[in-house]
Image: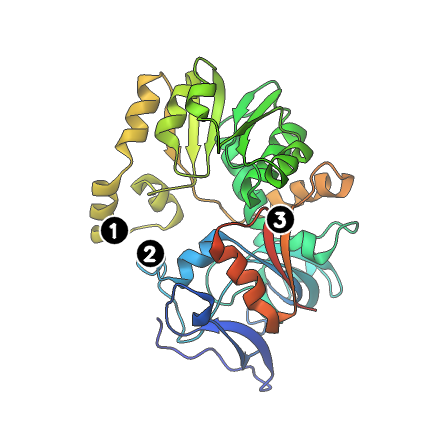
Amino acid sequence: MGKSPLPLHPNGDTMKAVCFKEFGSTSDALSLQTIPKPFVSSPSQVLIKIHACALNPIDKIRLSGGLAAMSPEPFETSVLGYDIAGVVEEVGEEAASSFKIGDEVFSRLKGMYYGAMAEYVICAVPELAKKPANISFSEAAAVPLAGLTALQSLRRGQVKEGSKVFIPGGAGGVGSIAIQIAKKMLGAAHVCTTASPGAGTEICKQAGADQIIDYRSEDFEEVLKGEEFDMAFDTMNQSVKMANTIKKGGKIVSISGTPTIEAIAEKYPSPSYMIRIVMFLSRNRAAERAAAKNGGTWEYIFMNPSGKDLSELASYLERGDIKPVIDTEADGLENFKVAVDKLMSGRSKGKCVIKVA
């Protein structure tokens, strides 16, 4: 953990936030604390009063210390979370040309200066977008990380009108919105996914999946043998098995398992020599070889926070073409464990959200 204290507000203002000072594997590592309220210190910054925040698997990894080697915690007290929706309360001089006080906005926060599980947060203009007026703050908070991850991954996989796409784990936060993006935004002709019977299958149907494989009783590798997908989106570290489903020239894009050094260098410029060595030794060569054997390619991708991409997603949210799936909504920061424990269980279908204001 970092050694520096959080910067004090010029007027001594404070806020409530869900914080951690030591890494841990359960919600017991988190506590509701009173910390300095963030403030605009740069012309491009915006101060947002948070109305809702959402959790993601990366929060579990961060809390356990899994990101510390590449992204050390800057302060002795850290606020968890990356996805927010709220109202603009203050704008920097440059930011005023894009946003004004009172605007309803949403964002996937970049960096680790402040986190989402708080009453206020500072955000830079490039990561911020205006919230669609027809959806709630909780629904908006459920979109950024999952939506951006899905959109950028599918585009990296060159999904376009008429594409045939395999997206396993369709009832999850990323999977459920990826199916919708593939069908409604990118025009995919056929989307196949995997899910458990019951609620999971129903979520996939509502998302628009054309084919749903019951992963409890069927092996997708056998069911899809001989199929020729243009793109397979690996959200569950199954790239080796997925290689047999793609056509010659097809692409597997992964967000699961060990990143490649290329992906890390793109996300974190100048990674250390030790990180390069570790990534070289743990590289998913089996996935690369399996994809190549079938005449395709495999690559790992990190999501890039983007207000521009969020604005594009917002237009589809506003039309009702894309609808976020919420599994759990905790009422208030003081009840954060309701959402965090559900995330930690690995059994959520859709997103875990906290209603802040």
Q: Is residue 28 left or right of residue 94?
A: left
Tell me which label, 3 or 2, sits earlier in the chain: 2
Tell me the kind of residue under disc 1. Answer: Ile
Q: CA distance from mark 3 to mark 2?
A: 25 Å
Above or below, 292 against 85 in this view is: above
Where does the image place residue 265, in percent across and percent down from the top left? Answer: 34, 45
In this figure, which residue is indicated by the disc labeled 1? Answer: 275
Where does the image place residue 271, in percent across and percent down from the top left? Answer: 29, 51
For the point 56% across and 45% down, the residue is 173
Above or below, 77 against 236 in this view is: below
Q: Nearer the viewer, residue 349 or 214?
A: 214
Q: Nearer the viewer, residue 338 or 10?
A: 338
Above or below, 47 against 221 in this view is: below
Which circle, 3 or 2, is nearer the viewer?
3
Where does the image place residue 194, in percent across and percent down from the top left? Answer: 52, 31
In this figure, which residue is indicated by the disc labeled 2? Answer: 70
For the point 60% across and 70% down, the residue is 335
Q: Residue furthest front?
A: 217
The label shown at residue 143 is 3
Tell me which label, 1 or 2, sits earlier in the chain: 2
Say which quarter of the image contains residue 44: bottom right
Q: Assign a secondary structure to mark 3.
A: loop
Is disc 1 in contact with disc 2, using a CB cutoff of under 8 Å?
yes
